[in-house]
Amino acid sequence: MFVLFILCLANLFAVAQSYETEKFIIQKSHSYFPDFKEADFYPMLYNLEAPVPDGNSARSFLMRQKILSRELFLEGKFSHIKVHSRSMKSVPVPTTGLEFTPSQKVGQNMAPISAGIPSDNTMAVSDGGIILIAMNSFIYAWDIEGDSALFPNYRIGLSTIAGGSPLTTYYDPKVYYDPDTDRFVLAFLRGFTPGTSQVFLCFSQTNNPLDGWHVYSLPGNPLDNNRWTDFPCIALTDKYVYFTANLIIPDVSWQEGFDGSIIWRSDKHQGYAGDDIQATLFYDIKFNDRLIRNLNPVQGADGIADQMVLLSNRNFDIINDTIFFVKVDGDTVLDIHALRSDIPYGVPPNGRQVDTDPSSPEYGLQTNDARVLGAIKFSDQIQFVSNTIDPETGYSAVYHGIITEYDYEPQLTARIIGDTVMDFAYPNLAWSGNEECDRDVIIVFNMTSFVHFPGVAAVYMNNEGNYSPVKIIKEGYNYVHRLSGSYQRWGDYTGIQRKYNDQGRVFAFGFLALADKKNGGHCVELLSPDSTSFRFDFMLTAKGVCENLIEAYVFNGTPPYEYSWNGNEFEATSYMDNVCGGDTVRLEIIDSKSCSAQKTYVIPFTDLPDDAGIYPNPASDLVAVQFHMENEGIIRVELYNAEGKQIAVLLEAHAKKGLNEFIFSAQSLTGGFYSVVISTESSIIATHKLIKTP
């Protein structure tokens, strides 16, 4: 059972900010066309630095922070964080559909593909049903319709796409699907020194990754000042690809080795065409004279962001409540704010495996730091996730933040998704709603514990901000053991994307421990448990030629509602009287979440008795409902209360053409007003008011 925490002290503050820009023209490096005639051995070079607590590297410093954080937790030093649990609601978990583990032929058998260290799981899915997956250091594709791997040899090495030596390290892949152009974008890095560092930006030539790619090489040392590029992220607007990363100074301590986050903004349409790309580099981005680290671009909830926003935090701090909110406005303007969350985050402890020494925070699965790992933007809010410590248990958990009013004075609230048994890490999230006003999301993350092998889990948050229980999607087959040092690598990120042309359908790709103690990945389709949508129907009370009353009854909305009759201003009146037969009535309704629905109705000339078709009314037990079918088909009969909330689905069945009757018992209902709605897949065919006697 997982717990959610909340605090109260949201605020915003702003101080001096600065940045620099430089213009580049990036020529296409080459075109890559998949050729499966020769074997690809996918070599990788691993940096197995021992994270000794007294070392000078960033990883050694992070280890010291984890050790200190554990000591403070055990001493009760987090008790000043006044955390109180949020009551659990009865929210269903997402259901699963398609699942697969990327595999390849070994002899006559199929075996899971091992990833690099770390896995770096990322994915994108096209409207046409191609899932493009990347791990260190290759891409892999799955055809949903064909239910099979797309590439004949199952995977393509990043070194092959780059046209470079297979003995050189290519790593940190990120993939993205562009629903505007029906193309894929792939980004990855090369090298760990200023002399070898490159950024590869690749654009698929069609919607099929088999049809070739335009490949561009951006400088990993763009200012020619002894830097190399690390940890990429990407997001798209209607015109640009935004690529963010960190600049690293080699051979110095961690305090001096970070030289800020950069933003590459490139014209995506030039990339799709294979033309020279006009690119702008934003660098030396500071807040209060301090460089901002790990800028994460916020993706559009529907795949395309209307404006580029980036998020960052103090990812190395044991406890902090600051989130940096960065907007790119115009060609050269960055607007930076520091938001203060109502609940702090902090460096997460390592995840525990079945073989982890419980007495030492140096062992287990490496969770890195608390940087923002995924973010999506709606018209009225931004949601993001990161790793954090759970202040109630001391375990690794998921930090889920929501930013509202971001065009004026951004406000930030957050919750922590933790567990009393499992560690969670490397989350990402996707919109799972079925209409534009929905704000429900599915959050996917890696999980592990003393009794669970490392695998993938998910949680669903509905429109009211309530969470489902955690659903374990796939548990691993063993614990991970690939490095000889104290910890094993876990992450460094997780892939997730909504299938943009299918409502409520999300695909995710996370970490999986394999039977041979190596690491791979597992892909899963997740379906939102919310299948309802905001809608309404009319109820006519016939009183005469021009004395009719028409009322609107709303289903699956969030009150209060506002009604606009025949284009007039919105008001709270849910009816129109003195309506004549033959009149056309147009109504638009908006609920408190800004969901809207519209419908036009022509008043019939024939006088109709009140609620003809349902009998008896009022009723205490059995109720009969009559309805007419123009053609045979599947019908759905639903029961709603007076607030428009669905009480039950009474029937789903095949109905014949002509007059039909449906009978049900209302005995279990409490006294009050209800609506019975009969619909087909395409329309509502009958709506009846029902009065249930006590």
Image: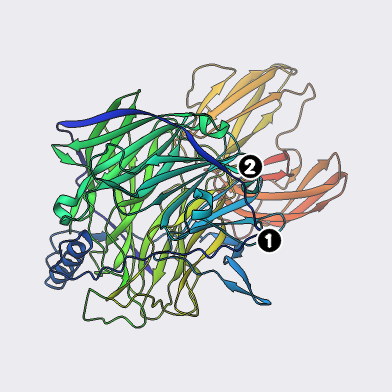
Residue 284 left/right relative to 589: left
Image point (57%, 38%), residue name: 179
- Determine the secondary structure under disc 2: loop
Q: Which amino acid does the dot numbered 2 rest on?
A: Asn
The answer, for residue 299, to whether it is visible in the render is no
When asked about the image quadrant of residue 593, the answer is: top left
Q: Label 1, label 2: how many angstroms apart (C-alpha)?
A: 17 Å
- Determine the secondary structure under disc 1: strand
Image point (86%, 46%), residue name: 632
What residue did someone put label 1 on?
Answer: 148
Above or below 490: residue 615: above
Above or below 41: residue 15: above
| Colour convention | rainbow
Question: Dot 2: within a 10 Å radius of its alpha carbon, few (fewer than 14), some, or many (20 or more) residues?
Answer: many
Residue 404 left/right relative to 107: left
Image point (33%, 45%), residue name: 245
Q: Which amino acid does the dot numbered 1 rest on?
A: Ser
